[in-house]
């Protein structure tokens, strides 16, 4: 079946989303077509607002609509402990456990030589600057237990240990080869509780 050009363009745009193939993209496009105009306008507005208002925290690189982010501005959090994660979505996964009251640092990826991503491509300099400012006692490496996550954790441990900090790694309460995004709260909490020296 040949689709009108504008509907086909919508399908093509949906296909660019992660995990959305041809059939899912068509289903979404037809759903939009059947949805009342005011609802599609709200969706468009929400997408524009996210692009216009959401940015990255100048301290930790987490997503925020205020800079610095609410977590970095929270005096009730322990700023002596920094939990290092790969991506902004990992912050909410760890924070949902309720067991961690420190602050975060988002690397915006992992070291991956096969994809041409090296240490200089990550937000490591910002982490080192935070540590150089003083007051940091421990850095928890909470990268995913994947090959790239482990390589990144090892690199950071070698970089940070000479600075005299306690450097820990989350325990393997999370299955190897999975992402923090897919782990349940209890597993992430256990992994934080069982972290070890690197």
Image (cartoon, rainbow, N blue to C red):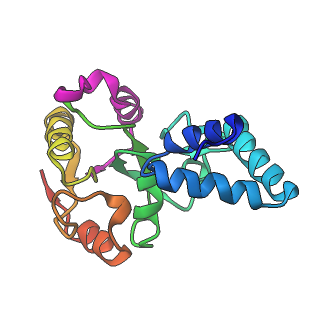
* 74 with respect to 186 (left or right): right
Residue 67's quadrant in the figure?
Answer: top right
Q: Residue 117 colored magenta?
A: yes
167, above or below 36, in the image: above
Q: Which of 174 and 25 is in front in this view?
A: 25
Horizontal relation, residue 151 to residue 71: left or right: left
Instruction: Note whether 131 is above or below 118 in the view shown.
Output: below
Total marks shown come to: 0
Task: Give the farthest residue toward the front.
Answer: 1
Residue 15: % across, % down: 50, 43
Going 24% across and 22% down the picture, which residue do you hit?
116
Magenta residues (range): 113-141
Residue ID at (84%, 60%): 36
Between 59 and 117, the one nearer to me in the picture = 117
Q: Residue 59: x, y in percent?
A: 51, 36
Whether residue 47 is visible, yes or no, is yes
Whole-percent x, y for residue 42 in the image: 81, 53
Q: Name the foreground residue: 67 vs 15.
A: 15
Q: Which of 166 and 186 is in front in this view?
A: 186
Residue 72, how many percent across, how many down?
55, 48
Q: Quadrant of residue 11?
A: top right
Q: In this view, does 66 lie to the left or right of 19?
A: right
**Furthest-right residue in this view:** 38
Residue 103 in view here:
no
Q: Does the magenta stretch include residue 30?
A: no
Name which residue lies at 20% across and 39% down: 152
């Amino acid at each position: 079946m040949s689709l009108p050009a504008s509907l086909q363009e919508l399908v093509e745009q949906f296909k660019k989303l992660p995990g959305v193939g041809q059939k899912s993209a068509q289903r979404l496009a037809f759903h939009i077509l059947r949805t009342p105009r005011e609802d599609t306008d709200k969706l468009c507005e929400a997408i524009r607002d996210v692009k216009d208002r959401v940015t990255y925290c100048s301290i930790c690189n987490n997503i925020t609509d205020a800079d610095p982010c609410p977590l970095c501005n929270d005096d009730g959090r322990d700023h002596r402990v920094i939990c290092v994660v790969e991506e902004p979505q990992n912050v909410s996964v760890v924070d949902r456990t309720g067991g961690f009251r420190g602050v975060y640092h988002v690397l915006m990826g992992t070291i991956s030589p096969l994809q041409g991503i090296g240490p200089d491509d990550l937000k490591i300099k910002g982490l080192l600057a935070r540590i150089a400012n003083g007051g940091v006692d421990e850095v928890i490496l909470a990268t995913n237990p994947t090959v790239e996550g482990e390589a990144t954790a090892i690199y950071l441990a070698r970089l940070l240990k000479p600075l005299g900090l306690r450097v820990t790694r989350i325990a393997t309460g999370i299955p190897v080869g999975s992402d923090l995004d897919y782990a349940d709260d209890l597993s992430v909490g256990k992994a934080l509780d069982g972290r070890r020296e690197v």
